[in-house]
Structures are given as structure tokens and as C-alpha cells.
Amino acid sequence: MLPVTRGPRPHRALSEAIPIAQLRGIVQLAGLSPERIYDLSIVSKLPITFIRVMFSARILGAANEIADDFKDEIAQLRVIARDAAVSAELWLRSKHGTWRFFLITAAGLIEIDRNGTPLAAMAPEA
């Protein structure tokens, strides 16, 4: 298992995340505090979304591996009170520019597209 790099904000990933987020609504960046629990928020009609942007060396890992690699960040995002109007997401970027997006739920992670739509909902019917 590869170690997960912790440390300063992923500036490249964050700068690339902003235009993606702007397609969904008004973007507000969180401060530089080391105690921050999210990097940016998207304010739209519904929901308001709090997002943590991270670098992932194992971008192609299964959702349960991602959940294990980023358990601290996920736990921090779960502190945010959520309901139908508030959600929390984990956005991951690889060193090659590949993105993956996850909705954080009480039960785990749901992979979503960059618009926030669950990927399972987009699968063609057999």
C-alpha cells in the first residue's frame, strides 16, 4: 500500500478545481488555517456543497481504498451538519491531471461526476 502524502494545500489541484466548481455555482475559498475542514464551497440553489481537494497517488483505487486513504479528511468533512440542502464532497486529482469526485455520506463514499451526479445513476440500462 502506497503512503498518502499529507501536508500543504495542493495548490495545482485547487487552482484546477475552481473552474470545475464554478460550473456548479458561486465558489468561495476557505482560509489558509491549518484547522480548515474544507478548501472551497459551492453556493447554488441546492445544495450548498463543502469540498476538500486532495492529491491522490492512487487515483484508480476502489472507493473503499479511497475512504481508507483519506479517512481523516472524510472525518473532518463529516463534522459539517448535512441535510438535503448541504453536502460534502472529496475531490481527488492525480499527478497526471485525472480527477475523481466523491459525495460523502454517513454510510461511505458515492462516486459522482464533476456536476455532482452519482455515476451509478448515469450507467446505461442493460
Image (spheres, helix red, strand yellow):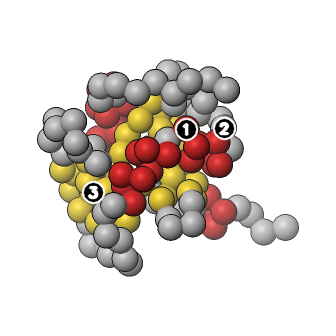
Query: Looking at the image, is 67 positioned above or below residue 97?
Result: below
Disc 2 to disc 1, C-alpha distance: 10 Å
Q: Quadrant of residue 68?
A: top right
Task: State yes or no: discs 1 and 3 in contact (Cβ < 8 Å).
Answer: no
Whole-percent x, y for residue 18 in the image:
29, 41
Residue underneath mark 3:
42
Label 3's element?
strand
Task: State yes or no: discs 2 and 1 in contact (Cβ < 8 Å).
Answer: yes
Label 2's element?
loop
Q: Earlier in the sequence, mark 2 or mark 3?
A: 3
Q: Residue at x 41, y 45 (%)?
A: 73
Task: Give the amino acid at mark 3.
Answer: Ile
Residue underneath mark 1:
69
Residue underneath mark 2:
61
Q: Residue at x 35, y 71 (%)?
A: 82
Q: Earlier in the sequence, mark 1 or mark 3?
A: 3
Q: Quadrant of residue 13?
A: top left
Q: Nearer the viewer, mark 2 or mark 1?
A: 1
Task: Give the amino acid at mark 1.
Answer: Asp
Left or right of 115 in this view: 34? left
Query: Looking at the image, is 66 positioned above or below residue 50?
Result: above
Whole-percent x, y for residue 15 in the image:
29, 31
**Pick the front one: 48 or 107:** 107
Q: Residue at x 16, y 38 (%)?
A: 33
Disc 1 to disc 3, C-alpha distance: 24 Å
